[in-house]
Image (spheres, helix red, strand yellow):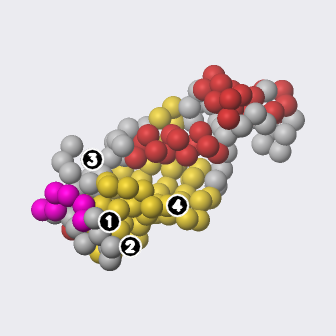
Amino acid sequence: MPIKYFEDFSIGQVVSGKQYYEVTKEEIIEFARKWDPHPFHTDEKSARDSIFGGLTAPATLVIAIASRLWHTADDKPALVAGLGWDHVQFAGPVRPGDRLSISFECVDARSSESKPDCGILTTQVTVTNQNGDVVLKLLDSYLVKKRGKTSLTK
């Protein structure tokens, strides 16, 4: 995949992942047992009786899947470092069998004051299921190399 530098991005530009990720019941339960053992993540009967009405993926698993899906996009930036997330919203449950996909829209782009060979991109990340329902939204900011700049300024 070609590298996209800071200058290659513009406000409003939308990039989509080229693959989807199918979430399995086994993955939800295994991940939850280790990292987020709420009964609505680990036990189908308890999950049916919960506010969710069925097994749901832990939020941390959804974030991990979003990270993996980010890497499937053709127009990824020449990432130097992640800077942070804002306005993280888990908009709907992720269930066994859901096929998740990702898109990100550039909402801000500015030069870095401390690293002149880099810029800072902020994207609105949206993860949807197979029905187009949004399951995750967040603002993601990261440091990106500028064209022709091979090393970071110290």
Q: Which image quadrant: the C terminus?
A: bottom left
Q: Where does label 2 land, which residue?
A: 108
Q: Amino acid at mark 2?
A: Asp
Q: Could you give the CA–CA distance between mark 4 and mark 2, rounded to whole angstroms? A: 13 Å
Disc 3 element: loop
Q: What type is the residue that disc 3 sits on?
A: Asp
Q: What's the residue type where badge 4 is placed?
A: Trp
SS for callout 2:
strand
Identify which residue is drawn at 38% across, 38% down. 19
Viewer-nearest of labels 4 and 1?
A: 4
Whole-angstrom CA distance, mark 2 to mark 1, is 10 Å
Q: Which residues are magenta?
A: 148-153
- Circle 4: element type: strand
Q: Position of residue 123 (x, y in %)?
A: 42, 63
Percent coordinates x, y for residue 46 in the rendering: 85, 31
**Nearer to us in this view, 18 or 115:** 115
Q: Name which residue lies at 42% across and 56% down.
A: 82
Q: Is residue 134 left or right of residue 114?
A: right
Q: Earlier in the sequence, mark 2 or mark 1?
A: 1
Q: Work out whether 9 lies above or below 17.
A: below
Q: CA distance from mark 4 to mark 1?
A: 19 Å
The relative height of residue 86 versus residue 91 in the rendered view (above or below) is below
Q: Which mark is residue 44?
A: none
Residue topped by disc 4: 85
Residue under numbered circle 3: 74
Q: Secondary structure at mark 1?
A: loop
Instruction: Find the residue positioned furthest to the right.
Output: 49
